[in-house]
Amino acid sequence: MNSQQAMTFNRVAIHDPEVNNIEGASVLVPEGWTLAGGFYWLPLFSQQADLLIQVTDPSTGASVFTLPSQQYVWTTQPSMLPIGSNWLGSVLLPPARDAFEFVRAIYLSGPLQHLGGARVVHVEDVPKAAAEISRTAGPQRAVRVTRVRHAYEWGGRGWEEEVTINLVYDRPSDLMFWWGYGTAMRAPAGELDRMRPVLSVPLQSLRYTLDWEAALEFARKLFRQYAEGTVDRAGRLGDLWRQHSAEIREIHRATWEERQASQDRKSFALREVLGGIETYKNPYDSHTVEVPAGYDYQWVKRDGTVFQTSNPQDNPGHGSNEEWQLMDRYRPG
């Protein structure tokens, strides 16, 4: 029997004030850790919205966070616009050749500026994750996923930080679109591998709701119409969502369900790469849940809270009116 101390992961809902404060996503947060950030809308860009969050352990300073994502475009034809301009909703920028070039161009002056003098200690491509992204991105697009580990001094302490960069490219042409986004996890020097299973849970558990994804697709449609001069989106997204939410939700349901399934497959593919993670099936909604390995029993509550223990007497439902169920291991078909 494993003697590890029981762990609780609370399901935290992330609401979006721009869309009538609906629940837009949820994430599992270790008990006692903090969640900061939320949704950011980009009305001048075709992407329209981004979710930037950070989950932090106050006792160690370890954290995991998402990095800004964007759609880029590049043309081989002469252009009067300077690099970095907004060209019809995409950022005009030549495609990054690799994760290092992308980080230097996009993140080092912003969210990863603390890595400016960091030492790179390990680089690893993740073909399993790239293959799963390719399933939804389409065979006409090239995908590369790379993990880069850094070591550095910050705040008088030594740190390790691993940045994962996802790059998706259209086929090269006179007008080429490409996408870049990433995540990062950091821990005190020498602690990243030990803390990786817990740090991985928030990112792997992140799930968007049907309503929010439907609203996003609706906003993107409005953006295209606005670009064509057919609608004024400014300040109207919440009102329009209230009027048409049921219709939009049903139209988008099939796409959302496929994205949920894709996230389940991607999480399972990453489990082997990340190490120390096991995948279970939530009996309440049939989606997967990724939790640190090493526990004999994985309980889940209807609201998504997860309780891990190796003590068979630790039934979190005893003495309460809350319903808990044991989860079974998930294995892809």
Image (cartoon, grey):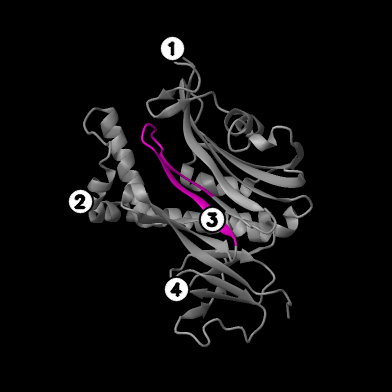
Q: Quadrant of residue 316?
A: bottom right
| Residue designated by label 2 | 243
Q: CA distance from mark 3 to mark 2?
A: 32 Å
Question: CA separation, marks 2 and 4?
Answer: 30 Å
Q: Vertical placement of 145 versus 252: above or below?
A: above
Residue visible at 67% across and 60% down in the picture: 197
Q: Earlier in the sequence, mark 1 or mark 3?
A: 3
- Tell me residue 223's x, y (percent): 31, 35
Q: Amino acid at mark 2?
A: Gln
The secondary element bearing badge 3 is classed as strand
Q: Name the amino acid type tagged 1.
A: Met
Question: Mark 4 sits on what residue?
Answer: 302
**Front in this rendered view, residue 322 or 292:** 322
Q: Nearer the viewer, residue 202 or 167?
A: 202
Disc 1 to disc 4, how far (Cα)? 56 Å
**Mark closer to the chain start, 1 or 4:** 1
Residue interval drawn in magenta: 33-53
Where's residue 68, x and y in %? 52, 39
Q: Earlier in the sequence, mark 2 or mark 4?
A: 2
Q: Which residue is the site of mark 1? A: 80
If you read the primary sequence from the N terminus, does the residue marked by circle 3 or circle 4 appear first? 3
Q: Is residue 314 positioned above or below 166 on the image?
A: below
Please give the count of numbered marks on the rendered protein: 4
Please tell me whether residue 310 belongs to the stretch shown in magenta: no
Q: Position of residue 221 (x, y in %)?
A: 30, 39
Any magenta on residue 36? yes
Residue carrying label 3: 35
Which residue appears at 27% of the width and 36% of the height? 233
The x, y position of residue 24, in whole percent, is 40, 54
